Image (spheres, grey):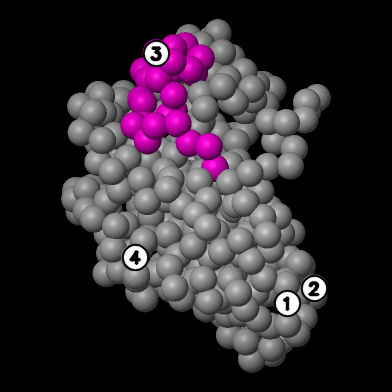
Amino acid sequence: MKYQMYYEMMEQPEALRRTFDSELDNMANISELAKSVDTIYLIGCGSSISTCYSIRDALSSVSDLNIHVFTGYEFVYNKKLNEGENSLFIATSQSGETVDTLAALRRANEFNIDTVSISNEPESSMIKEAKYPVVTLGNTETAILGTKTYITQLACLYQILFAASGYEKADEILEQLATIPDLIEELLVSTEEENKNLADEMKDEDGFYCLGSGVNFGLAYKLAMTMLMEGAIKHACPLYSAEFRHGLIERAEKDVPLIFLNADLESDKLTKIAINFSKNKLDAKTIIYNLSDYADINPLLAPFVLVIPLEWFVYYLAHFNDEDPGSTRHIGKVRYE
């Protein structure tokens, strides 16, 4: 049986190609804006905020861009905003109707801040109300955890902000970003079986800890918050790898599943220490996704690569527990207020 998530995973490469063919010049104009501001606000919820975390942490080690990440309502209640301040607001949303994020967009517009919306729905409120809309061309996505919308949002943020970053290797990053659709096509084929088997092995586990450092924390957040909890209906908790020694070191025990994302970044020194401690001291169920096992690419692009085997793992984890990885129990079905 193939769930809707399967078809949407397979559409990721083409969604990226269509988006870049359509929006590259538009994003170049936004990059010029980003170069001239004092502050960049990145806003999102769920999978969308995970893309904000990833680009923020990717740039924090190589650029002087002043980037702040907020969930929607945290931005609405931010008391530091000033009328006409020299800043750029970038909102990300799959639907373009996320209530929290839309409220934040309207708040930024009230302060006459230049606003950008990145969304998959061209007729959505966020696309219509932003001064600079960016439409990702993945067609409507129905699987709740987000595959093609995640990858296209993340790619747009990388394109816009690395082009504005002043990073000496930005051109290299953007050249490699352009090859990502072909790489994802290969990974969708090559990583399925291994992660299907891993999901079968882990199907009876109740919960997972998901750890990543630097650029991979955003993906660890997505893995826990939307992929495992929403898609596979499993308890999950995201952490920075460096925080393993504060809290989790006391709670992780033998046979507790720990998922580590490792890209050999400078900050992954602490990821590797946590991996070794988990394996050798705790005898935990240590699951490691190494970037080097999948691609020879700049480690700042790791989320684009590692998300594909993780999608297969979650897809089959749901399947082996008789769950549809794209459906929901409450989101969009029960009024939340």
Q: From the image, tell me which residue sits under label 3.
A: 131
Which of the pair 86/77 is nearer the observer? Answer: 77
**Picture quadrant of residue 296:** bottom left
Q: Are marks 1 and 2 in contact (CB under 8 Å)?
A: yes
Which of the two residues, 146 or 239, is positioned nearer the viewer here? 146
Left or right: residue 235 versus residue 263 is: right
Q: Which marked residue is nearer to the observer: mark 1 or mark 2?
A: 1
- Residue 325 location in percent, x, y? 60, 52
The quadrant of the picture occupied by the C terminus is: top right
Q: Which residue is mark 2?
A: 251
Amino acid at circle 1: Val
Q: Which residue is mark 1?
A: 256
Q: Does the segment drawn in magenta span residue 132? A: yes
Q: Give the structural element (helix, strand or loop) at label 1.
A: loop
Which segment is the magenta one? 119-143
Between tags 3 and 4, which lies in front? 4
Q: Residue at (45%, 31%) from the top-left corner? A: 140
What separation in Å lies between label 3 and label 2 (alpha carbons)? 47 Å
